[in-house]
Amino acid sequence: MFQAALGATLPVALWRLPNTREAQALVSAEVKHTLPSMEGPQSGFAFYPFQSSGAVPVTFLPADLYFSGKAGVSPQIGEAVLPTSFWADFQKTGQKQSNILEWPSHPEGTVKPITRDVFEVSGAKAIKAMQSGCLDKVVLSRTKTLPLFEGFDLLHAFTQLTQLYPTAFVSLVSIPGIGTWLGATPELLVQVDSYRVFRTVALAGTQPVMEGLTPADAIWRQKEIEEQALVQRYIVSCFRHLRLREYVEMGPRTIMAGNLLHLRTDFSAAMDEVGFPKLGTQMLELLHPTSAVGGMPKAAALQMIGELEQHDRRYYSGFLGPVQLGQETNLFVNLRCVELGQDTVTAYAGAGMTADSIPAKEWVETELKMQTVLRLFQASES
Ligand SMILES: C=C(O[C@@H]1C=C(C(=O)O)C=C[C@H]1O)C(=O)O
């Protein structure tokens, strides 16, 4: 199906929800550039940038053909009709085909790679600004580009990620004129489940997993505790803004995301009981970008990112995921991801900085975050 969609230049998304087995997939006849309501009735897949622009637009892929991946459940066909060239190819894809040769890449090519020096100088400037009290936290990111190795298989890479990271949201999204992205993110942004319960999380603070220790053994420094508390307070401020007081807050606790540990607080609210039937849509507008990928205060942090980062984040630290499929909406922050060129792969990662941060350590943190997906591309580094 993925190959047939690429062959017919149609947008396609493939994903596996955390703690589930089935890979789900969707093909659209056409990309939309606005998001529908998170509570329905429209269903599809959202792929939303960090900050939208002409070359990096908001995208929504309507579910014109949707596979739930569940045994015995037939595919659902949506409103728009897919072209016959897709169906002709689709019939063939039952038989095993060779590797995909071409996938869409961004029309402006690869983003600028950021060297260690450039990252650390920007980090030092940000830390200085925070020490003088201009802001509390800013997340600075960087990129790294590697050549693709001979025989790289995109669908195999997706399957590998599903096996390596059972608790992550694993995705492969390919949109003509926009690009092809692969990732395994640990961060839920907005969930509206089939019982109409809203959920989000505050995720921040990072340390490597230590051999022989469980997440419960992790010890956190004041800096990380404070960094995560900022994200938590930001979510609470969004609830307050809506005048919603009846929500459940649990945590923070330590969770494992691949080779890393993070601190996570879980929030939930039964939307109908608390009188907010559109809470998913309302919170999404307020949350993105959260201080887990932007900073605090939000406006000052976004301005600093604009001034200090020399690359466009594109869809990194945006959000993505299925909307009203299987009666649920599940949107995740687009982290631990790579963007594919024809012969290159570009990883993106960021680190939350506060007045106490040390630029060299933040660089190492971005390296570790990039490893989540880049480990599949290691053959390229030799
Ligand atoms: C920004 C990233 O991750 C976010 C930042 C974290 C931090 O600063 O400690 C931790 C988890 C994520 O919320 C990334 O993976 O690129």
Image: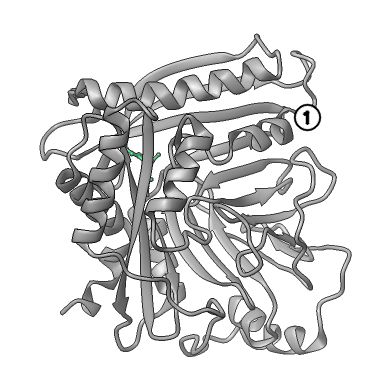
166 or 170: nearer the eye? Answer: 170
> Which residue does the image show at 81% across and 42% down from the upper left?
40
Q: Position of residue 125 (x, y in %)?
A: 27, 44
User: Does residue 379 lie above or below 356 as drawn?
Assistant: below
Its colouring scheme is one colour
Does any atom of ligand 1 lie closer than 8 Å to the CB of label 1?
no
Corner quadrant of residue 210: top left
Judge left or right: residue 250 versus residue 6.
Answer: left
Corner quadrant of residue 142: bottom left
Q: In this rendering, does residue 268 appear at all?
A: yes
Q: In this rendering, does residue 169 appear at all?
A: no
Q: Residues within 10 Å of mark 1 (few under 14, many from 20)?
A: some
Residue furthest front as drawn? 132
333 or 86: nearer the eye? Answer: 333
353 or 70: nearer the eye? Answer: 353
Q: Position of residue 220 (x, y in %)?
A: 21, 24
Number of marks drawn: 1
> Which residue does the image show at 18% across and 50% down from the upper left?
364
Residue furthest left as drawn? 212
User: Does residue 42 lie above or below 286 as drawn?
Assistant: below
> Which residue does the image show at 74% across and 89% down from the upper left?
88
Q: Amino acid at mark 1?
A: Lys
| Residue at disc 1, secondary structure | loop
Q: Where the N terminus falls, by quadrant?
A: bottom right
138 or 80: nearer the eye? Answer: 138
Judge left or right: residue 313 versus residue 62.
Answer: left
> Which residue does the image show at 68% across and 56% down from the upper left?
45
Q: Which quadrant of the frame does ligand 1 lie within? A: top left
Residue that carries the numbered disc 1 in the rendered image: 278
User: Does residue 199 lie above or below 42 as drawn?
Assistant: above
Q: Position of residue 373 (x, y in %)?
A: 33, 61
Q: Position of residue 143 (x, y in %)?
A: 34, 63
